[in-house]
Image (spheres, grey):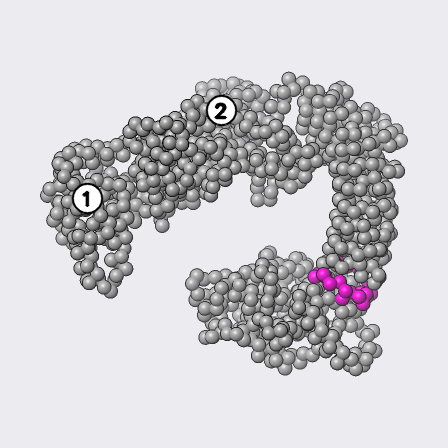
Amino acid sequence: MSSPSSSSTFRWKYEVFLSFRGIDTRRGFTDHLYAALQRKGIFTFRDDEELERGKFISPELLKAIEESRFAIIIFSRNYAFSTRCLDELTKIVRCMREARLMIWPIFYDVDPSDVRKQTGTFGEAFNEHEKRFKENIKMVEMWRDALREVANLSGWHLQDRHESEFIQHIVKEIMKKLSSKSSSIIKNFIGIESTMAKFIPSYLGFENNVYMIGIYGMGGLGKTTLARVVYDEFCSHFESSSFIAKVREDSKKQGLLGLQKQLLKDTLENKIIHINNVYDGIEIIKERLCCRKVLLVIDDVDHLDQLEKLVGEHGWFGLGSWIIITTRDEHVLKQHGVLKRYNPNGLNNDDALKLFCLKAFKNEQPKKGYMQLSQEIVKYANGLPLALVTFGSFLVGRTIDEWQSALDSFKKTKGEVFDILKISYDGLEETWKDIFLDIACFFRQWEKDEVIQILENFGFDARIGVSVLLERSLLTMDDNKLLEMHDLLAEMGQKIIRFESGGNVEKLNRLWLTEDLFHVLKNDMATNAIEAIVVTYGEVDFNFEEFPEVFSKMYNLRLLIISKLHVQNALSLVPNDLRHLVVPNNLRYLSWSFCPLKCFPSSFKPKELVQIDLRQSKFEYLWKGVMRSVKLKFIDLSESENLIRTPDFSGVPRLEGLKLSFCSRLVEIHPSIGQLSKLRYLHLQNCKSLTDLPSMSAKMQSLTVINLDGCSKISSVPKFTGIMKSLLELYLGETAIKKLEPSSIECLTALTLLDLTDCENLECLPSNMENLKSLEKLILSRCSKLKSLPRLPSTVRFINAQCCSSLKWSPTLSRLSQPLFWWPPYDESGSGVAFTILYHHLQGLLFRKTVYGTSIERKEEGTITELKIIVSGFEIPSWLTHLSLGNSISIELPSNWCNSKWMGFALCASVSTSKWMELSVRACVTAIGCMPQNHYTTERFTSWMLCGNSIWLLYLSRDDWLATIGNGECNQIRVVFETDGSAIHVRECGVNLVYEQDVDEFSQTNGLCSIERIVGDDDDEDEDEEDDDDDDDDDYYFELLRILLSR
């Protein structure tokens, strides 16, 4: 379907196009109708006799159809015998579908049912056409469809009426339609054309459906204007139309019954309809409009009941109808089941300036000397059309000084824009108003989940509250889930707070400006009115002698956030033993980065405190002894370089998170940490003075992550005294660990990731590593002294062993099942290793099929069973028979390629990079020759790689392929390796089909054998012993396969 978006600017050459069969009506009815239209000044196209004699429609006639606003089709007895008339009809119908014109059928001396069902003379005509065009029967069907579609439209049937009277009625109706003017708003509503170009093709259509569309957004955004423009531009395409404005307001004045009457009066051509009540109204709307193609706009809805009584269901209206609803509350649209919802953006800066200037100067550009002030006002309005129009209209004819004064006044006082925006605020529940005001003052550009977490600390139903504000367009959220609020909405919220305080700073319940906070502090004006303080950025010169105590006077303070605030000479007069942070006991959320104080006082009893965030503070300790705070969940003292020890945690049993990263002087973690059953994460990265951790007991049943990266003095794994059922990730990178104790490892039954990056003293891993039945990722990068790897569990799919210079490969790698393998860059036998892994992976699949009689690969729904291998190397092995330079390759597939013996595809790429960086590669495989053409895109596999070359091998299984593509009917595939970053180059790539018989060939070609482990140079003395145990190794290998395949 061609886009109708240009309809908002298209100007028709003809107002009416007449389509008729000349031998039936040219010199009679059609001639009289044409003359009547001409007398009324209606510019009408009628083809002349020369065109009639032509066998085909000329380009001139086709162009005339496209340039006409309306088409009148006069169906007469012999109309269908003319193939030229039928082609003309088909073109007209196509233009109607593309919203280029509107059709009115006239049934002249024929029954509409004969046209619709192709009976009578129309049936006779089509019997001839089917015989004549039996080689092109599709064209005949197109003619039939066009006739049926037009015959179903509302039109005029002559029957026994006088022709003159009939023609007068037709002309009157056409005049009525032509009198509908295009929206006068278009001239002044800058940006409407681009908005219409996006809105119409994306949200509306011209097929035989009923379209119900919602336009939602904050007040003043232009929702009603957009709906009005759409209405004025397209109402002539519908049999009836109605614009019900101000539903929220008028439903209170006249009730929904009055709005139902208006809708019926508009759509039934001013007929008086008697309705007793709204339920009768519903039945009458359904009865009278169910077969009528209508355009309805229901404007400014704020309650579901309004929609249920006016436009309850799609089935109330005829096919092709448009129902457009505007509202500030998206939730109302969701409740009513409106699936297509459009949220208009504000105007961009250029369009906003044009709109403002049209109002202020009656020109699209500012007067000389007014440009800077104009830009300031446009910036202040932030794309809101209502504000631009209001400000511009107010400033017409005023001097520059008056403009500056007015701008200052706009920012201080309430006015029309404020009152309109406040309507949405007034409709909120009290708790949602609190959430709105907190966000308006404090949390713009904050991450949504973080804001919700903070607000929930205050007893707010924040998740539903934020959702309501988003639905009512009082909030927006970007792609990064950052909350944003229009500048004027935020300003409105702040004005509401100032208004409620009577203009007294000390009576503000929220403080968000640095100057207001220090006005209160300097003048000792702290009161019970203050509930929340959030100040960020700024520099002040203030004597802190009284400062530590002042917060304690704010008894109702629930929220205190001070961030990036530099205070000169902050503690110059405060004795060291008094540098305590004194806050009220009712405080719930505390965040103060760079806090200059050293601890909480012993009198601190935080019965309501949920979160402490004192990053980069001067704290030496939190509190002495046991502090009871049963609601405290999170503590963050990261980068507090003076912190020496943690407090006793026995008084905070609900603690869920503890972050102490980069506390370089921290030497002691209190043993009570082992009793925290709710603790979920423990972050201790780069605590350089920390030498050990207390024991971790089984009571820590919620603990999922321990991070000790960079704790360079820790020489042993934390001692675990029981099974850690929830611990999933353990980070031990850059520690002084030499070995992992088997007693600790056996407790980590749930562990999925073990990271030992840069453990330069690590020499070996414990023999019981194979008992880690959940382990998936093992990171060993740059463990330069690591000499051997033990047997690993079958769950391992990812190993990073880069730069493990003491490790060497021997043929026992096959113990690993389906790993994602990173291989040391120095090793030049990488490609052989990669295919060893692939061989044993395929061997395992065949083992399952042979032993268990199951399909080659069975996977849980929603999982991907790709095998990914990364090794060092430059040349793609010759085993791959299809090779191509660059990052893409296409291959023809043999006939019957997707037979029962086919196992999958092997894809390979030679990748190089010029610097140490993170590489990300994925393969996109396109199936060509099947309908529709399908794509399979692999998961990205990512690796930090040294500069140099590597081989990336991917095995794509039969199951994964068929689950995505759906069949094996394609005859060609195209593979493209996609990379992130300009420094990554795919030199060459290849692809092969893998069949069951290939597995034996792999073995013969590469000389593969069963092996058990990776060993170092000092293990040579054990080789003879290993040779004697080949049978045991084979038994172990098949037992490992059995365990793997039974998962």
Q: Is most of the magenta stretch helix, strand or loop?
A: loop
For badge 1, the amino acid type reads Phe
Indicate which disc residue 391 carries: 2
Q: Tell me the residue that label 1 is attached to.
A: 107
In which quarter of the view is residue 722 placed? bottom right
For badge 2, the amino acid type reads Phe
Report if residue 161 is visible in the image: yes
Residue at horizontal 42 percent and vertical 37 percent from the top: 312
Q: Answer with left or right where residue 782 lies relative to residue 173.
A: right
Quadrant the C terminus occupies:
bottom right
Q: Nearer the viewer, residue 237 or 390?
A: 237
Alpha carbon of mark 1 to alpha carbon of mark 2: how far? 56 Å
Give the mark count.
2
Report if residue 977 is visible in the image: no
Residue at horizontal 49 percent and vertical 32 percent from the top: 303
Q: Tell me where residue 39 appears, x and y as whole percent.
A: 16, 33
In which quarter of the view is residue 358 placed? top left
Q: Tell me where residue 59 appears, x and y as whole percent.
A: 23, 51
**Judging from the image, what secondary structure is the residue with disc 1 in?**
strand
Q: Nearer the viewer, mark 1 or mark 2?
A: 1
Magenta stretch, residue numbers = 755-777
